[in-house]
Each structure stands twice: as C-alpha cells, then as structure tokens.
Image (cartoon, rainbow, N blue to C red):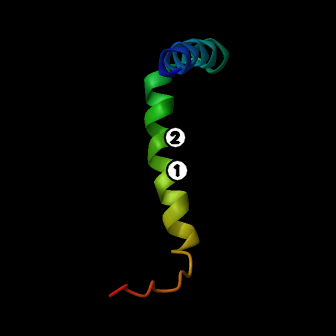
C-alpha cells in the first residue's frame, strides 16, 4: 500500500511542477512548513485531563 502512495506522490509532484513551474520539492517544503503553522495558529484543543487508574 505505501508503495502505491509513494508512486502517486511522485506523479503528483511532477504534475504540479508542470502546472506551476518551479520545483515540486520547494512547493512541498513550503506546504510542510505551512501545515504545522496553521495548526499552531488555531491553538491547542481543549482536552479534559485523564484520570489515572490505580
């Protein structure tokens, strides 16, 4: 299964490079920096503290 996804990712990056011009690895680096930033901007979800079992 992972091999299929990896092959699909390579194909997708090649298409993005053709459509957008430029290098796909730079686009992916920007995206991987943006995703965590966006998650931090939303803030941490409110989660109740779990009770320890004794």
Circle 1 crowding by C-alpha within 10 Å: few under 14, some 14–19, many from 20: few
- Contact, CB < 8 Å: mark 1 with mark 2? yes
| Disc 1 to disc 2, C-alpha distance | 6 Å
Residue at 62% x, 11% y: name it: 18
Quadrant of residue 15 in the image? top right
Q: Position of residue 13 (x, y in %)?
A: 55, 18
Q: Position of residue 16 (x, y in %)?
A: 61, 19
Q: In front: 53, or 12?
A: 53
Q: Position of residue 23 (x, y in %)?
A: 48, 19
- From this viewpoint, which residue is outermost toward the right? 19
In the drawing, what numbered circle is on residue 31? 2
In the drawing, what numbered circle is on residue 35? 1
Quadrant of residue 14 in the image? top right
In which quadrant will I find the C terminus?
bottom left
Residue at 67% x, 16% y: name it: 19
Residue at 58% x, 70% y: name it: 42
Location of residue 4 with respect to 38 vertically, above or below: above
In the drawing, what numbered circle is on residue 21? none
Q: Position of residue 36 (x, y in %)?
A: 47, 55
Residue at 55% x, 59% y: name it: 38
- Secondary structure category for the residue under label 2: helix
Circle 2 crowding by C-alpha within 10 Å: few under 14, some 14–19, many from 20: few
């Amino acid at each position: 299964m992972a091999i299929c996804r990896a092959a699909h990712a390579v194909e997708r990056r090649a298409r993005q490079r053709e459509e957008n011009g430029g290098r796909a690895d730079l686009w992916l680096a920007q995206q991987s920096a943006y995703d965590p930033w966006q998650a931090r901007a939303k803030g941490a979800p409110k989660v109740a503290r779990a009770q320890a079992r004794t």
